Amino acid sequence: MIDLTIPKKIRKYFPQDVEIKWDNLSPVLDELLNREISDAQELEQWLKDKSEVEAALEEDFAWRYIKMSCDTANEELVKSFQYFATEIEPKISPVANLLNKKLVDSPFINDLDQDKYFVYLRAVKKSLEIYREENVELFTKLQVAQQRYQATTGAMSVVINDQEYTLEQAANFIKDTSRVVRQQAWETIQQRRLLDKDALNMLFDELIAMRHQVALNAGFENYRDYMFQALGRFDYTPQDCYQFHEAIEKEIVPILKEQAEKRAESLGLEVLKPWDLEVSTTGKPALKPFKNGAELIDKSITAFTAIDPKLGQMLNIMKANNLFDVESRKGKAPGGYNYPLAETGAPFIFMNSAGSLRDLTTMVHEGGHAVHTFLTADLELNDFKHCPSEVAELASMSMELISMDQWGIYFDKEEDLVRAKKEQLQDVLKTLPWVAVIDQFQHWIYTNPSHHAADREEAFKQIYTRFGAGFANWDGLEPEFGNVWQKQLHLFEVPFYYIEYAIAQLGAIAIWKNYKENPEKALQQYLDALALGYTKPMNEIYETAGIRFDFGSGYIRELASFVKDELDKLN
């Protein structure tokens, strides 16, 4: 019998069952601040003790966030989340800064293994550099305000054919072979989004004002420049992002434009409208890879096991410990995520499945993140597990492609499997211009902080048009066109976290290319890279994975050509 329990990590420093309240935390943090350290060995022990406290706090916050996003209408869960955000975090932040100073000021810091701690110490020094006490209160206000996006969007539902659906569930109608059905569904969803357009615009204005003030307080001209430092983007600049956008426009947009023209021809349409982009050009109903959430989990475990039994075991452990919430329902926050549980060493997967191929992709994507969580669970310091998004998303996006060899588990018919692979590869290419749109939009938003909602809408339309505007005709749909950006959770909750998807998408294509040539070697390189966590610079992690950290035009052309060839093989 295989043991599926998760062994509880025994704390060696922080009391095991202490309730997370400031009165209980304060003495522990004071001890860390005041402890005498007389050599490098004691400094390392101090780092481990500090890490243990950080992991406990992270997991406590994780559960508050998870429970709230599973039921955004539950006031007690919202209050629990807000308690941490307003009563714990603001008090911890100044102490964390003092602990960082204690570390950097220690006479024994240079006696630490510089190779082992290089990445970590670099991040600590950057954190100290941009820390400002006056931002603590602003971060608290931001944390609470951002939660209003979840509450607003989680309450959205529509009625189609006299039945109520969440927006995720209703989106399945946009894949209907009847153009009338999918147009009505699309319009119904958009009208529901437009009902909250002004409220979300006002929320976003609040967020921009607070974020801009954070940047000014820290001595930056704008929030974009602040966030590049705060996110630890040591390996590329805003100018590199602009060049990346241009390369995507030049190399990817023409391929997608050509595909859109073929789509219109296959569907017998003069022009594609936004409700014509998801329906299958085969004239067949949308793919149904699973019946319900339980089946999605079980099939995914089987698929991961077929790639490598160790990977299937990871998802099995999660299932046995109720670490999934995958069904879409009213009152649940939108989107999907893999939330690492810092002490437990396993993650929680949250998503809104409604029986679609996109849900299958989301599951294997989050499953890739889950594998990453398990592989880094035993790294010595909690901070070693905090990977930059360019690495975290490499884990998930690579798994989307690696797992495709096992997608026969989700489909009984070969023709459905071929369709699923084609749609996935088309989505891989479609990801790149959308990421460029959202990233460039954020650059514009935060370098023009005094703009109004109407300016923002106009800027979005211009940027979206530059990258193909979804390769549909939006004539007569101006309000909906200008409001497309509001569906992107990242803009509200995790600003500037988006370009990473495109960088990681290129890396994932490169890993998949290696996997097709030598599955065993490529899989091992992928797992070895993930197991590093963030103990090496980003380019070294990519090299360990057997690929390059490169988003130049030539590399994009090479990888796009590979995907296009693979698509042609499926036709």
Image (spheres, rainbow, N blue to C red):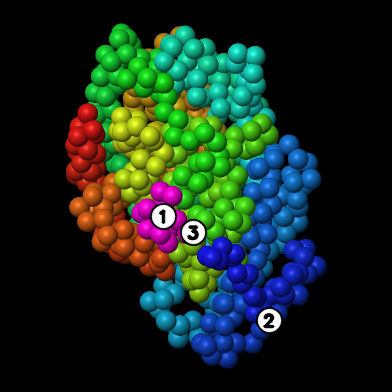
Tell which tag, 2 or 3, sits nearer the viewer: 3
- Tag 2's secondary structure? helix
Q: Residue at x 74, y 44 (%)?
A: 78
Q: Residue at x 56, y 55 (%)?
A: 318
Check disc 2 and report the residue beneath it: 34
Q: Residue at x 75, y 46 (%)?
A: 77
Packing grade of label 2 (10 A; few <14, some 14-19, many >=20) is few
What's the magenta region? 302-313
Q: Which of marks 1 and 2 precedes in the sequence?
A: 2
Q: Is residue 442 visible?
A: no
Q: Residue at x 68, y 34 (%)?
A: 331
Please give left or right for residue 159 compared with residue 489 in the image.
right
Q: Which mark is residue 314?
A: 3
Check disc 1 and report the residue beneath it: 305
Q: Is residue 501 visible?
A: yes
Q: Which mark is residue 120?
A: none
> x%, y% of residue 59?
63, 60
Q: Amino acid at mark 2?
A: Asn
- Disc 2 to disc 3, C-alpha distance: 40 Å
